[in-house]
Amino acid sequence: MKTLYREFISTTLLILGISILIGFILANVVYVIFTKEEITQQNMEVAEQIVHVLEEMHVSSHTVHPFLESVGQLGYQIYLANRPGEAYFFGEPFEHTRLPDHTMKQVLSGTPYMGKDGIWDQLWMMGHFSNDIRNTVGLPLQIGNQTYALFVKPASKILFSDIHMMLAGFIVAVAIVSLLGVIKMTKRLIHPISELSEATKAITNEDFTYSLDIHRKDELGQLAENFLRMQQQLQHNDVARKSFISNVSHDFQSPLMNIQGYGDLLLLPNLDEKTRLQYAGIVSDEARRLSNLTKQLLLITSLDQSGYPVKKSPLRLDLQIKESIKKHQWSLQDRNLTISYKLDETVLHSDRELLAIVWDNLITNAIKYNQPNGHIFISCTVAGNKIILTFEDTGVGLSEASAKQVFERFYRVDATRKKDGTGLGLSIVKEIVTLLNGTITLESELMKGTTFTVIFLMEGHDESWNKNGVYG
């Protein structure tokens, strides 16, 4: 498998190699354009001085060799030849001593030799350092009646001086340290990525407890923090999903078992009419309860989808709430409850069907958990750019702990669990109000009642609402 570590190292080495190649090419270009001619000219000046000294002061061939020996010891390589083919070397030996015949003839005829001039030799900077006789400069030398060809170049030891060796060592050291640094940096970079990969595998296996040991202040640290938040959210969602399935199974199982049990009892041949009607009523109630639960589950599943279609249109809130109150008149009379309201004429641009569900659930909740001979008060007022609706009852109320959980799905207070609820009503209310860019809060006190407050922003006003449905 091609790992990121290997790929990063390979890429770094490739970039380093390309950089060296480009640098080498640029150095050769600079050498050919600027340096080569200057160095050749300097060597030519040295050769001219040697020729001048020999022609002016050493008129005898017996003194030429000692002089050239002394020059060679000063750091120069010298080749001296004449027409009959006599050749002499002074100073450090040449590695390559073959000189083209036409070069020898060229110098003996009086034309200076300027060193290597081939296209590849010019582009190859290292030719400047080669210990080759062709890398010399040549001048004609006249000693008495004899013409010689004198070829001169600095010795290789001079070219590779201490400073050059120090520079080469510096470059090699930098390259090694850079490579080691890249390897170490790569390991440090890849380690958190590998750890995140292992954590991802753990989440794939539904293990949400994998601990990340990544403490960085860069983008990888931020990625690790985001991953931990995602892990916590997935864990929460997993718990909520399992709880949801468990609650749904329980809430479906109970009415189904009742329907099955009382359905079997209805099949008994010796059942009297009164008992049969009683059992049939229980079956009908349980079927209605099951149908209501199914509708609520379908609704809350639809609300969970981000693309739920909201159909907004202008509507009179006061009239819609009055219609909802009329639907519950029989429940109010059956529980001997009284209801009053103060509804200002209010127009809101929103979804009519979803709001009807909100009012129906809030009124049902106020009736179901009210005390005998209790009262319900509903108000709708406009304050500035806000529409404020309150649903107040004199019911059993909620404890502080229960008030914090009442909007959670399937949450039901133990004391009121027998009230035939599904635990989804207020959760649906919260989902709808938030979807319609509103907020809902509650105030409650045990045995004194509960007040739900719904706030909507009037159309045309731009205010901030946070994701939890709280205005501010």
Image (cartoon, helix red, strand yellow):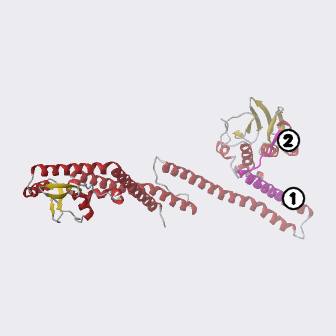
Mark 2 lies on a secondary structure that is helix
Residue nearest the observer in this picture, 195 or 151? 151
Dominant SS of magenta comes to helix
**Tag in front: 1 or 2:** 2
Furthest-top residue in this view: 384
Pointer 1 with pointer 2, Cβ within 8 A: no
Q: Is residue 248 above or below residue 317?
A: below
Indicate left or right for 94 with 263 as reference: left
Between 140 and 347, the one lying in front of the other is 140
Identify the residue at horizontal 16%, vertical 52% (top origin): 51
Q: Where is residue 295 in the image (x, y as percent from the top left)?
A: 79, 55
- In the picture provided, is 329 more to the left or to the right than 18? right
**Residue 468 badge:** none
Report the label total.
2
Residue 255 image offset from top left, x and y in percent: 78, 60
Which residues make up the magenta segment? 285-314
How packed mark 2 is, by other alpha carbons closer than 10 Å (few <14, some 14-19, many 20 or more), is some
**Residue 333 visible in the shown view:** no
Q: Residue at x 70, y 41 (%)?
A: 446
Residue 310 within the magenta-colored segment of the rendering: yes
Amino acid type of disc 2?
Ile
Q: Mark 1 Cα within 10 Å, few/some/many (few <14, many 20+)?
A: few
Instruction: Give the residue number, with chain letter if any, for mark 2.
Output: 325
Q: Which of the image's four quarters has the C terminus?
A: top right
Residue 448 x %, y %: 73, 38
Residue that label 1 marks: 281
